[in-house]
Image (spheres, grey):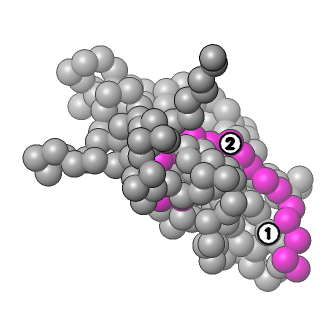
Amino acid sequence: MRMSIRMKWIRTGFNGCIFLMPCILAGCASAGSASAASNGDSVRDAGMPIHVFPDEASWSLQARAIDDSSYSIRVIDENGNSVQTIGDLVSRPPFTTKDLLDIRDYNADGHPDILARTMPVGASAITGGVLYIFKPAARQFVESEGIEQEGDITVEPDGCISVEYRSDAMNYRKDHYCWKDSRWVFQQTAKD
């Protein structure tokens, strides 16, 4: 007799700390509070308005749960039409737009970009992120290339960013990049 086991994540606390632990579905019927959507239905979320072009009406972004551990981003134009779906990003609940997406002009080109939150990187407190740059000619968000490490991305002045990541068991580093010729160009690494 073959037995298949499906798993989902539950949030549990111990001495004030929060951990995510796998839970076998058969024994976790009451642990559904951490689950955003177990059957792929989207979480009811109003979305987030953005202005991709200054002279046009606003678009909106909506994070939608795919399953208990992943989500997609739906880009909706001013007419309510879905113009792009960015997807299968792995993260942890809650799957709400405000918790998962950070919208700002990361590369200082005058258009908003999307930082999509992902799982913590390694065994650290740093939350990962995938950066999507808006390409005006294509009217699409494109995954940013040229960033070497996965980590916490922060905006710095003049179209630059820093990416903080764990370099080994004890140390963190921060790589600095600037937007030049339509791509991220590595500048330097700083040890924290």
Q: Is residue 178 left or right of residue 128?
A: right
* Amino acid at circle 1: Ile
Left or right: 137 as drawn, with respect to 128: right
Q: Residue at x 85, y 65 (%)?
A: 82
The residue nearer to you, when weighing 24 against 115, is 24
Q: Is any part of residue 108 visible from this angle?
A: no
Q: Residue at x 34, y 20 (%)?
A: 167
Label 2 sits on a secondary structure element that is strand
Residue closest to the eye, 56 or 114: 114
| The residue stretch that appears in magenta | 79-95
* Distance between the alpha carbons at the discs numbered 1 and 2: 17 Å
How crowded is the residue under tag 1: few (<14 C-alpha within 10 Å), some, or many (20+)? many
Q: Establish if 96 lies above or below 8.
A: below
Q: Which residue is mark 2?
A: 88
Q: Amino acid under label 2? A: Asp
- The residue closer to the viewer here, 125 or 65, is 65
The image quadrant of residue 121 is: top left
**Which residue is tagged 1?**
76
Q: Residue 122: x percent and y percent?
A: 38, 26
Image height check: is 72 above or below 166? Answer: below
Residue 155 in the image: state x and y as whole percent. 46, 52
Checking the image for residue 189, the label placed there is none
